[in-house]
Amino acid sequence: MKRRSFMVAVGASPLLAAMPTVTNAKAEFRWKMVTAWPKNFPGLGTNANLLAQMINTMSGGRIKIKVYGAKELVPAFEVFDAVSKGVAELGHSGAYYWKGKSATTQFFSAVPFGLTAQEMNSWLYYGGGMELWRELYQPFGIIPAATGNSGVQMAGWFNREINSFEDLSGLKMRIPGLGGEVLRRAGGTTVNIPGGELFTALQTGTLDATEWVGPYNDLAFGLHKVAKYYYYPGWHEPGSTMECLINEEAFNSLPKDLQEIVLVACKAANLDMLSEYTARNNQALKTLVDKHGVKVMALPDDVLKKLLVLSDDVVAELADSDAMARRVYDSVMGFKEQVSAWHELSERAFLRARAL
Ligand code: CA
């Protein structure tokens, strides 16, 4: 509507048409971005801020975005609905939070023992992943874009040692998505609560364990103050993709250049988050160990092997849930097989060589 009245005004006045800076100085689109993270939360909330700021700057102020932390406009787990209904034009979250909408969404954030960050981006941009993701969200009037990746996460914070597979039995743990289902089959009880509530849940004993992200984010929540052991690796989230949800109608109302700016900004934010996490996780890990005396422990190989077997079952069953899940499964698993063969003799062989 705004755009149309602007065009009429330009057509009516040759003087205005010769002075495009006058109209450029005015924001044509004032958007809201709702997020699943606490406002300004390091890495996640700040990525949402960065994305909003880049779109604002690159558009010369034609798109102005106000970013809302979780609960400021809508709760963390209502971000998807808010964007779908147009309450907000943009959302910033993780696709596995929406498994209640479609179980298939989980393939677009993290699959246990699945793709790493580098592999995930390759699948999305060059392996057919993005096309499938768009198709999945299309019925909800949402266009998805990858806007960040955590890299390999940590297995999480535990109040007891995990020395055998049996130690997972009876464990009350916050672990979302497919990893949560795997832990349930290992005998644990799982809940998914927003990140902002983890500290209290561990402190009060509502939880025995929680995963969150990695040293950088976990340190920010102070999880080391309420749990004894910090386990690795994050078998359940080997390279979790964060998403920008774009209301389709709002997107379609943009001129082509602004549409491209929104999508390119998401790509830039995607690269930024992985770079930031890679740099800051190792600084934070050092702080956790040197300053706070955190015990960093590896999950035993036999525990990981059993989790892997359970994960394969869970992911295969997910593929049976509907035709779309099957297509996404075939795509991502086919990609995993190919890229694993290549990464055996590139990434893995090199990392091994570097450590000789
Ligand atoms: Ca996580």
Image (spheres, rainbow, N blue to C red):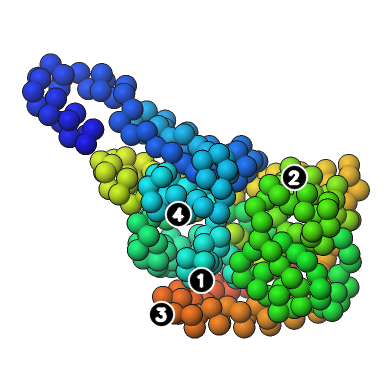
Q: Tag 3, which secondary structure?
A: helix
The quadrant the N terminus occupies is top left
In this view, the residue in front, 197 or 356, is 197
> Badge 4 is on which residue?
81
Q: Amino acid at mark 4?
A: Asp
Q: Earlier in the sequence, mark 1 or mark 4?
A: 4
Gap in angstroms between the C-alphas marked 2 and 3: 40 Å
Q: Which mark is residue 221?
A: 2
In this view, the residue in front, 312 or 185, is 185
Q: Tag 2, which secondary structure?
A: helix
The x, y position of residue 156, in whole percent, is: 76, 60
From the image, state whether disc 1 or disc 4 is nearer to you: 4
State the residue lying farthest toward the right.
Answer: 293
Residue drawn at x 54%, y 74% is 336
> Badge 1 is on which residue?
103
Q: Amino acid at mark 2?
A: Phe
Residue drawn at x 43%, y 38% is 32
User: Local crowd at mark 1 within 10 Å, few (<14), some, or many (≥20)?
Assistant: many
Are the residues flagged by discs 4 and 3 in contact, CB closer than 8 Å? no
> Badge 3 is on which residue?
323
Are the residues flagged by discs 1 and 3 in contact, CB closer than 8 Å? no
Q: Disc 3, ligand 1: is the CB inside 8 Å? A: no
Q: Earlier in the sequence, mark 1 or mark 3?
A: 1
Gap in angstroms between the C-alphas marked 2 and 1: 29 Å
The quadrant the C terminus occupies is bottom right
